[in-house]
Image: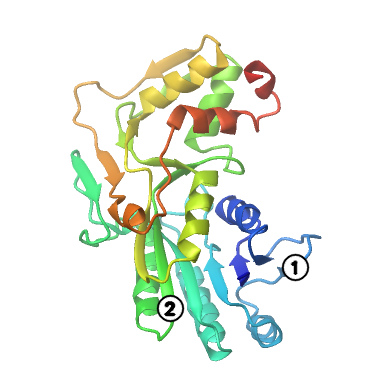
Amino acid sequence: MKKKILITGSNGFVGKSIKEELKNKHHVYGLGRKKNKEKNYFNINLNEKKKLNQLFKKIKFDIIIHCAWYTNHEDYRQSKKNNEYLKMSKFLLDTFIMNGGKEFISLGTCEEYKKKKFGKNFFSERSEIKPINNYAKCKNIFHNYLKSKKIKYKWLRIFYLFGEGENKKRLFPLIINHIYKNKKIKINYPYFKTDFIYVKKLAKIINKIIDKKVSGVFNLCSGESINIINIYDIIKNLLKKPSKLEIIGKKKLNYENIYGCTKKLKKNKCFIKTNFENDIKKYLLSFKHVSPRLR
């Protein structure tokens, strides 16, 4: 049965992909700060309490998928704006419950977990929690707040993402554009290994999770880690262009290795296996100046 699903931050990097994935299966509505002429979209800021309350009185959504948060690439990890989004998120949840809301799905982060420096970091949903920055701290506070409420919920701890719509200053677009333009690229931590997942694959996993009756925490990850040098090599080989690489980090350092446990995803039949090279190729096709080289 089709559900009425409201996605906050539906214009953003993650929210947009989720909206596109769900629209053929459910009645999908978007909410965001930016103006948008799309059908079933509401131009409402999360701090506009009166408008939010009126919306929830008018439309009885079955589920909210809460993607809206402060994500400015330059400072999102430590910014005090995370505290503002925490406050707005609490109001969003309370108002939804007050108007009869039944299920709330929210995006968390793997950075909520306690991390060991310079070593293996394998995180399951039961791993110890110790947020490493203000972004993760505020997310975790909201998770605890959500758990305390009488509502069905899912807390999705997302690992590291790449894909269409991401900020041009992030790792993948930087590598792609530097290689394409034959510009020298400097890599500070070339052997740092982490768990990357393609944003469209993430959306497909969320699409599966929506139908599950189980509540609680899910790790959204590939279950594998890859280092920066390997990512660079894959992109370079796909683009078939020479490039200039300058490695700043020392090869002998014991770099961190971060990856997530996928047992819960598999148990609930939500896991989608990663083919990293194919996912990068799909992403490259979204770069207009790059894609002709891949066709």
**What residue is shown at x 59% (from left), y 18% (from top)?**
180
Q: Which mark is residue 152?
A: 2
User: Measured from the top left, where is residue 164 in percent x and y?
Assistant: 60, 41
**What residue is shown at x 65% (from left), y 16% (from top)?**
293
Which quadrant, please, contains the C terminus?
top right
Which quadrant, please, contains the N terminus?
bottom right
Crowd class of label 2 (few under 14; some 14 to 19; many from 20; radius 10 Å)? some
For the question of whether residue 81 can be seen, the reply is: no
Q: Is residue 27 above or below residue 182?
A: below
Residue picked out by circle 1 = 40
Viewer-proximal residue, 155 or 22?
22
In terms of image quadrants, where is residue 187? Answer: top left
Which residue ends up furthest to the front in the rendered image? 1
In terms of image quadrants, where is residue 292? Answer: top right
Q: Is residue 75 above or below residue 65?
A: above
Identity, as a three-letter code, of the amino acid under mark 2? Lys
Total numbered labels: 2
Identity, as a three-letter code, of the amino acid under mark 1? Asn
Side (left or right) of 236 relative to 60? left
What whole-number distance in Å separates the C-alpha atoms at marks 1 and 2? 24 Å
Viewer-proximal residue, 21 or 225?
21
Q: Earlier in the sequence, mark 1 or mark 2?
A: 1
Element type at mark 1: loop
User: Measured from the top left, where is residue 131 in percent x and y?
Assistant: 29, 60
